[in-house]
Image (spheres, coloured by chain):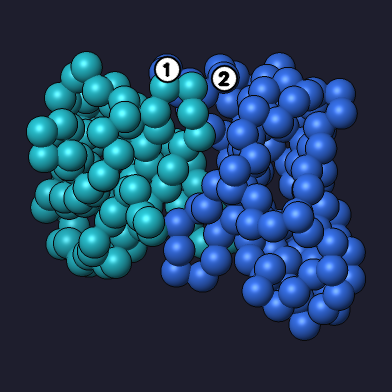
């Protein structure tokens, strides 16, 4: 596709349920990032993939959060036993280079998660 | 611990005047800095960046200034236009590391 695609755009779930959020990056982009943005805050780093492997998962808040990118393209962020505090917009971004330099992150529109 | 700080939550500027958005950082390992712009219900979009080997980068109406000794950078928009009304995020990274974002500054361009 032309840009980063995230599905679903909106997800409402009940406390304790399991949720999966999908990200389809720009074709050919090797790096893929997940961020979380709460109201009034900036994007908060969660995890970064270079190819299939997680290069840095230091931002995942706890073991309820997990992300995969099995074929080095599409990624899925998985949240177990959701809590109300998980409510946020989950942003995915991809980039052509491994980190920075002349490349930059291209963001999707985000998946808004609401945990009731 | 906020490594990238944008201390002004909002800023209002008259159309046609200069908008100056400020950003401070604490991590001396940061060597690449970016500004992103975000409209409601959209993802952030890249605006301009600067490497730590430079102190200024200009792209059309947008200029970013970097003061490494003060660990400070600023984004200048001149002249400001109505379409510039958005939230602006400052971001930074150390070599080959994750990109850290500030909390953002909401810019209002007044007619």
Chain under callout 1: A
Q: Which residue is drawn at 24% across and 23% down?
A: B52
Q: What color was chain B assigned in the picture?
A: cyan
B78 or B58: which is nearer to us?
A: B58
Answer whether residue A46 is visible to the viewer in this image: yes
From the viewer's perspective, is A74 left or right of B106?
right
Q: Where is residue A41 in the image (x, y as percent from the top left)?
A: 45, 63
Q: Which residue lies furthest to the bottom in this view?
A: A116
Q: Which residue is under mark 2?
A: A98
The residue pinned by badge 1 equals A102
Whole-percent x, y for residue A31 in the image: 64, 25
- The spot of residue A99 in percent (x, y) is 51, 23
Tag 2 secondary structure = loop
Q: Which quarter shows the C terminus of chain B?
A: bottom left
Residue at (45, 69) in percent of width and height: A40
Residue farthest front in this picture: A63
Q: Position of residue B59 (x, y in %)?
A: 26, 27
| B96 horizontally vs B63: left or right | right
SS class of the residue under badge 1?
A: loop
> Which label number is shown at residue B64?
none
Q: Which residue is drawn at 64% across and 28% down?
A: A55
Q: Quadrant of residue B50?
A: top left
Give the class, few, some or many, for how many residues have Cα within 10 Å of label 2's Cα (few <14, many ≥20): many
Residue drawn at x 37%, y 37% as measured from the top left: B92
Nearer-the-camera pick, B11 or A31 = A31
Quadrant of the rendered image containing residue A28: top right
Label 2 resides on the chain identified as A
Q: The blue chain is which one?
A: A
Give the foreground label among 2 and 1. 2
Compare residues B37 and A32 and report the one nearer the observer: A32
């Amino acid at each position: 596709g032309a840009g980063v695609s995230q599905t679903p755009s909106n997800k409402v779930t009940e406390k304790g349920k399991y949720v999966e959020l999908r990200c389809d990056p720009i074709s050919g982009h090797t790096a893929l990032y997940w961020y979380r943005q709460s109201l009034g805050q900036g994007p908060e780093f969660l995890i970064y993939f270079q190819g299939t492997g997680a290069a840095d998962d230091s931002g995942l808040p706890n073991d309820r959060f997990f992300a995969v990118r099995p074929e080095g393209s599409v990624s899925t962020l998985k949240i177990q036993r959701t809590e109300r505090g998980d409510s946020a917009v989950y942003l995915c971004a991809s980039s052509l280079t491994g980190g920075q330099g002349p490349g930059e992150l291209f963001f999707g529109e985000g998946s808004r998660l609401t945990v009731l | 611990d906020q490594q990238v700080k944008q201390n002004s939550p909002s800023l209002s500027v008259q159309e046609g005047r200069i908008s100056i958005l400020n950003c401070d950082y604490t991590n001396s390992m940061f060597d690449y800095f970016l500004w992103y712009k975000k409209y409601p219900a959209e993802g952030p979009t890249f605006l301009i960046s600067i490497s730590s080997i430079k102190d200024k980068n200009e792209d059309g109406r947008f200029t970013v200034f970097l003061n490494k000794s003060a660990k400070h950078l600023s984004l200048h928009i001149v002249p400001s236009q109505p379409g510039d009304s958005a939230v602006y995020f400052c971001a930074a990274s150390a070599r080959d590391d994750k990109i850290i974002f500030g909390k953002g500054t909401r810019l209002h361009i007044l007619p």
